[in-house]
Image: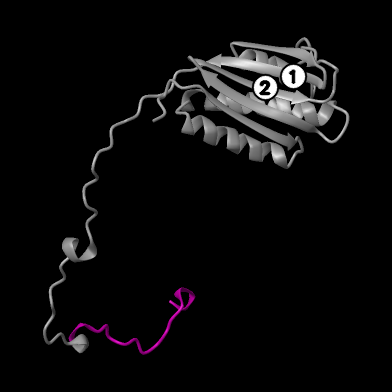
Amino acid sequence: MVTIDSPRQYTLSLHATPARIPQVRRIVAAHLRHWRLENILQPVSLGVCELLTNVHRHTEGDGSCVLELRWARGQFAASVADGDPRLPRLQGPQPFAERGRGLALVAHLSDSWGTHTTPEGKVVWFTLTAQPQALRPLRPLSPTPTLSTTVSAPVLVDFDLRAHAHPRRTEARCLSDA
């Protein structure tokens, strides 16, 4: 049996394309939910999207990269490795710039972040402190009422529709004719 304290890891090789990044975001969210780390779902999803967007925009080649998620002993780490050896740089605040704020956002959302070169290129990573949420005990649901148990309509015997009919109007008039 796997206990909640056992280390978790997920690795995904992908091409960082605009169509693929939202799919990966959903995959990351599913793993965090499975690991009961919903409390860090938003910052991790956003951080991973920023790292993958950087691969798409700033690396040479087809955007091939490897995403790795790890959780052990209360520490969560996400990393993206790609084949471009150029390290990203954290830029100063540029309030009206359309680009260039991704690493600043990752730095703000995480406890720590960094980069390092590898023989194949580089790795960009970030970490967060994370404890799994406790399981909530299951409670039995009360039965859902059905139509037969909630509504009982009286049976009408010898109902005469003619007695309740509206009198017929013989002439139609407009308000402007009055």
Is residue 101 at least partly visible in the picture?
Answer: no
Q: Secondary structure at mark 2?
A: strand
Q: Residue drawn 80% across and 14% down?
A: 117
User: Looking at this view, is 69 or 119 the one in front?
Assistant: 119
In space, the residues marked 2 and 1 are separated at their CA atoms by 6 Å
Q: Secondary structure at mark 1?
A: strand
Residue occupying the far right of the picture: 60
Left or right, 112 with reference to 36: right
The image position of residue 67, as x and y in percent, is 68, 28
The image position of residue 112, as x and y in percent, is 63, 10
Residue 34: in magenta span: no
Q: Which mark is residue 1?
A: none
Is residue 20 at least partly visible in the picture?
Answer: yes
Give the labeled residue for mark 2.
Answer: 79
| Majority secondary structure in the magenta region | loop
Residue 77, placed above or below residue 159: above
Q: Amino acid at mark 2?
A: Ser
Left or right, 32 with reference to 19: left
Residue 169: in magenta span: yes
Residue 38, placed above or below residue 14: above
Left or right, 135 with reference to 60: left
User: Looking at this view, is 150 or 23 the one in front?
Assistant: 23
Q: Residue drawn 70% across and 15% down?
A: 104
Residue numbers of the magenta segment: 163-178
Q: Which mark is residue 123?
A: 1
Badge 2 vs badge 1, beta-carbon distance below 8 Å: yes
Specify few, some or many for label 1: CA neighbours under 10 Å numbering under 14, 14-19, or 20 or more. many
- Using the rendered view, name the quadrant where residue 92 is placed: top right
